[in-house]
Amino acid sequence: MLRGGEGKPGASEDDDDGLVGITEVRSKAEALSQCSKWLDEHLPHAVRVPCESSAQADRDAAGAVDGHVAALASDVAGAMYGARVVRRGVQDDQDNTTRFVILSATPPPSSLASVTDGACCTFLC
C-alpha cells in the first residue's frame, strides 16, 4: 500500500487528490519494482528512492510534514510509524505475496510468530 505523511487535508484513499504533492516514493527496491506499473500511471513524475526496508521508508514518509514523501509499506510498518494510508492495492499483480524464510538453530521467539501471524513466514529449525 502507498502510505504518506500529512497529505492534502480531506483527501481520502479513493481520491486522486491524496496523490497531489507526492514527489518521492520510497521503499525496498523489490517493492518499487512490484508496483512500477501503478507508479508509472499515477505518479509518473515521482522520484523512486530505494531504501534498506519498507519500514524505513514508512518512517521517512511519516516524518515528512509537507506530504511530499510517500512509502510502499505494510500495515505493520504503519502501526509502528503512523504514516497514513494514501492508497491500497498498488501492486501490479493483485496476488503478489512476499515470503520470508528464517533459518535458525532454535525455534523462533513466540513474539515473531504473533507479528507475522504465520501467514507469510516459514521457519526452518
Image (tube, rainbow, N blue to C red):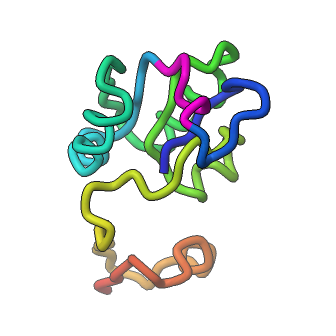
Residue 26 found in image quarter: top left
Residue name at image x 38 percent, y 37 percent: 27
Residue name at image x 24 percent, y 47 percent: 30
Check the image and name the residue furthest to the right.
Answer: 10
Residue name at image x 60 percent, y 32 percent: 18
Q: Which residues are magenta?
A: 16-22
Q: Is residue 97 above or below residue 2?
A: below
Q: Position of residue 32 (x, y in %)?
A: 28, 40
In the shown orientation, is residue 86 left or right of residue 107?
right
Q: Position of residue 13 (x, y in %)?
A: 62, 47
Query: How many callouts does the rendering have?
Result: 0
Q: Position of residue 73 (x, y in %)?
A: 48, 48
In depth, the one of 43 and 59 nearer the eye is 43
In depth, the one of 52 and 22 nearer the eye is 22
Residue 1 among those drawn in magenta:
no
Residue name at image x 70 percent, y 35 percent: 11
**Location of the C terminus (image quadrant):** bottom left
Q: Is residue 113 above or below residue 7?
A: below
The answer, for residue 97, to whether it is visible in the render is no
Q: Is residue 46 above or below residue 4?
A: above
In the shown orientation, is residue 29 left or right of residue 109?
left
In the shown orientation, is residue 24 left or right of residue 117?
left
Residue 101 found in image quarter: bottom left
In the shown orientation, is residue 121 left or right of residue 70?
left
Q: Is residue 85 above or below residue 42?
A: below
The answer, for residue 46, to whether it is visible in the render is yes
Q: Position of residue 91 (x, y in %)?
A: 33, 55
Residue 41 found in image quarter: top left
